[in-house]
Amino acid sequence: MLPLSRVYVPAIYVRLDPLLGRIYLTLVKVLNKIDAISIEELDLLYKIPNSVPISSNEWLNVDELINKMWEALDLVRVYTKPRGQAPDYSAPVVLKRGKCTVEDFCNAIHKEIAKQLKL
């Protein structure tokens, strides 16, 4: 089996432990060069927790990496829709899951909007 290069994407998820004063980080391990291994070896790589096997050369499985990173970061995309028009999918507003109220959305765009609206 060829050695796989690993790229660590740090600070994907941060959990605080107030009793011990520790911060735990969960990383997504990116295992590259899957185009150079067999299907059996690829099946073994899929069993590694918090990892995504990809091929940056052949651009294989990069969409799964992107989805895994969005999931690990716990982010959501919010799309705007002007009245009477189709939604604008080109520029979403990115918010943290659990903090995606109308007020949070307004604050992400501009702080003054939330003050002007009666929420």
Image (cartoon, rainbow, N blue to C red):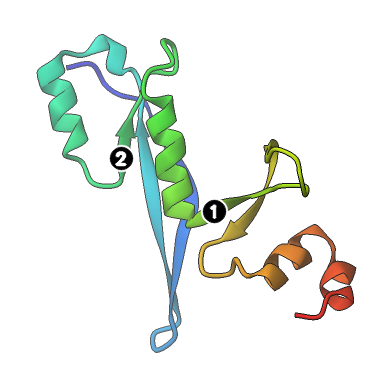
In the structure shown, which secondary structural element does the residue marked by tag 2 occupy? strand
Left or right: 20 as drawn, with respect to 78 = left
Q: CA gap, disc 1 to disc 2?
A: 21 Å
Does 98 sit left or right of 38 as displayed?
right
> x%, y% of residue 74?
47, 57
Residue annotated with mark 2: 51
Percent x, y for residue 102? Answer: 68, 69
In the image, residue 86 sits, relative to residue 34, either above or below, namely: below
Comes first in the chain, label 1 or label 2: 2
In the image, residue 109 above or below residue 32: below
Residue type marked 1: Val
Residue closest to the eye, 88 or 47: 88
Three-letter amino acid code at disc 2?
A: Ser
Residue beneath disc 1: 76
Quadrant of the image occupied by residue 4: top left
Mark 1 or mark 2, whichever is nearer to me: 1
Q: Residue at x 14, y 22 (%)?
A: 41
**Position in image of residue 43 (x %, y %):** 14, 27
Identify the element where label 1 is drawn.
strand
